[in-house]
Image (tube, rainbow, N blue to C red):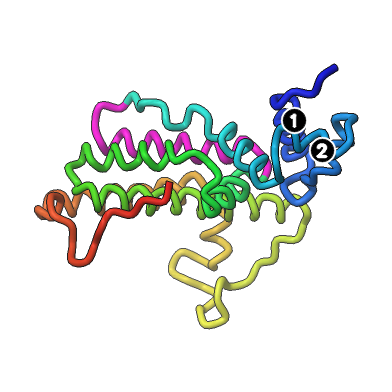
Amino acid sequence: MQLRRGDVLDGAMAILDEYGLGDLTMRKLATSLGVQPGALYWHFPNKQTLLGAMADRILDGVAAPPTASTWDGALSELAHRFRAALLAHRDGAELVAATYASRLTTARVREAFVAAGLRARLSRAHAELAGYALLHYVLGHTVDEQSRLQLAELGALTRKPVSPDVATETAAGSDDDLLDGDPAVRFDFGLTLFVDGIRTRVHAGGAEAPGPNVTPVRFN
């Protein structure tokens, strides 16, 4: 049976979900598909392009038009969709973050964030920057969330202050107490701060003109 591009991608996703990103090698993938490693390169010239295709599959549908009728509702809906897509696959956030850094995956999610920022009447430059900021917030939060979950499953999650310069106890408890809570609650808190910041900027009249020395940033 002829090996198809979709077969390679399916096999790679299966290894990712079962073993994690660290165990995804072209040799292991070829063995799982019953082919020689060289057969994979007819479809993907290198591992990096394979990872880019995997990231695109993970993000498929995330940037679909939001159902919310307001800019803030749209931004929140998109951010939650993004997080859910990353969490649906083992090491999903780490994989997508790596492919974003190397510009190997789709820019549609960021563009959807930018569109919501424009609906809020941010300038194009500020909407672009806000899109990157929210993209990085969701990725960073979810990388940490998945890492802590995997460490906990291995019994390797230590309890100590985030920094030796910070007291063990805070008003809300230890640093670990704060991080041991529901990650969805922490995510929503940060997302609310982000949306409130955009709203404050817009209401303050700073939406139409970029700040000094701020120009649109385009990587994808």
114 or 7: nearer the eye?
7
Residue furthest toward the bottom? 165
Instruction: Look at the image and tell me whether residue 182 can be seen.
Output: no
Q: Could you tell me which quadrant the N terminus lies in?
A: top right
Q: Which residues are magenta?
A: 68-90
Report which quarter residue 90 is drawn in. top right
Callouts 2 and 1 close, C-beta under 8 Å = yes
Between 50 and 70, the one nearer to me in the picture: 50
Q: Would you call the spot at circle 1 few (<14 residues within 10 Å), some (14-19), or many (20 or more)?
A: many
On screen, residue 118 versus residue 20, left or right, reads: left
Circle number at residue 8? 1
Can residue 157 be spotted in the picture? yes
Q: Could you say which disc has been placed on residue 29 in the image?
A: 2
Residue at 75% x, 25% y is 7
Name the spot of residue 6 as percent of width and height, x first.
69, 25
Residue 179's tag is none
- Residue lying at 42% horizontally and 31% vertically, measured from the top left: 63
Q: How many angstroms separate mark 2 from mark 1 (CA)? A: 8 Å
Residue at 24 percent across and 32 percent down: it is 70
> Residue 79 in magenta?
yes
**Residue at image coords 82%, 38%:** 29
Q: Amino acid at mark 2?
A: Leu
Query: Left or right: 93 with respect to 211?
Result: right
